[in-house]
Image (tube, rainbow, N blue to C red):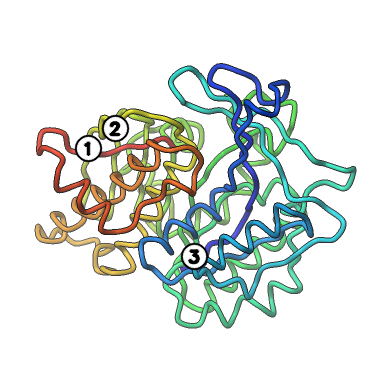
Amino acid sequence: MICLGEALVDRLGPLAGDPATASAELLDDRLGGAPANVACALARLGTPTAFVGRLGEDAIGDAFVELLTARAVDLSALQRDANRPSRIVLVHRDATGERSFGGFAGDQGLGFADQALEQGPLEQALPPLLTGAQWLQIGSIPLASPTAAQALHRAAALARAHGVAVALDVNWRPTFWDPAASASSGPPAAAVAAMRPLLDQAVLLKLAAEEAQWLFDSRDPKQVAAALPQRPAVVITDGGQQLAWCFGAHSGSMPAFAVEVVDSTGAGDAFLAGLLHRLCAEPTLLRADGDGAITDRLTAAIRFASACGALVCQGAGGIDPQPAAEQVVAFVNTTAATDLPAAVPR
């Protein structure tokens, strides 16, 4: 697995408080960023993983290198930036732990390191990783910055040339495109146009329900798959409500695990990591035929992935609570059949 994109700090404010104004003792800084979260989760589950991104030459960057190295994540394609800091994202949490993003901290005038992911070094470092890789996992956030967008599109092209499947988690975050944007606003036409080539290439597409509505005017994964030329596998999450999927002829839905939420940051990333972990182990799950045995195995894989997300919800931050595979299996095995899992926050 190769995970490409942002690694950053999620600055969690107090429940129902504001991380921009709260006193230091009420703040909780956690290493995060969707691709970094997925890489860490995959590594903990036991899937060999590389992380590709750009970090500042600062304490945050050093902390990521220490963490990713400890998780045995390959960092041969990691870039460091001496002029731009690693990004700090201000995370608002409501009284139930659900989160929203409300701006950034740390910009010194040149933007953040993740915005400056460079194509040149990527073209040298990525091909050796793609040789033998099964998946390249990406999101839409690098598209918000011209330099990083160019690098992301080049990475997708290299993946195609090497026969490596692309997994796209849309992960729409309006404040990365416009710091003044409402956290609940959908993607404008320019952002959709930037996403289109990646949507058209993805073999696996993960969307939140509102993202599916914005981009495809439907929350039905079968309709989303039918709207794209390559008919990808599609998974649509809807917070703690319902998870729905369509993998060719195989489709279904599940209700969510009922767990006490401490912090939902990174739960969707853990879900995606759990699913990719299982797809790496069982690539035939992507088959588009109507084999009933595949339907059962796919349902079990999605249940496993949903358990990964549920377990992360029970701790703070997107990385520290990530489970090992045996913890996920134990969690699934102790959940009553009437409490079948499904969706986790995106």
Residue 55 drawn above or below residue 335: below
Is residue 146 rendered to the left or right of residue 70?
A: right
Q: Position of residue 322 (x, y in %)?
A: 41, 50
- Residue at position x 55%, y 78% from top? 129
Q: Residue at x 80, y 61 (%)?
A: 81
- In x, y percent, where is residue 142? 66, 51
Q: Which residue is mark 1?
A: 254
Q: What's the mark number on residue 227?
A: none
- Answer yes or no: do the residues labelled 3 and 1 have beta carbons within 8 Å? no
Residue marked by disc 3: 71
Q: Nearer the viewer, residue 233 or 225?
A: 233
Q: Quadrant of residue 297?
A: bottom left
Check disc 2: other Cα within 10 Å, few if <14, some if 14-19, many if 20+: some
Disc 2 and disc 3: Cα gap in Å? 31 Å
Mark closest to the chain's N terminus, 2 or 3: 3
Q: Residue at x 63, y 75 (%)?
A: 76
Judged left or right of residue 126, residue 249 is left
Task: Identify which amino acid the numbered label 1 is placed on.
Answer: Met
Disc 2 element:
strand
Q: Which residue is mark 2?
A: 242
The x and y percentages for residue 213 are 45, 31
Q: Between marks 1 and 2, how big is the CA–CA gap?
A: 6 Å
Q: Amino acid type of disc 2?
A: Gln
13 and 204: which one is in front?
Answer: 13
Check whether the beta carbons of the residues at disc 1 and disc 2 lie within 8 A of each other: yes
Using residue 74 as the reference point, say whether residue 123 is left or right of it: right
The earlier-in-sequence mark between 1 and 2 is: 2
Q: Secondary structure at mark 1?
A: strand
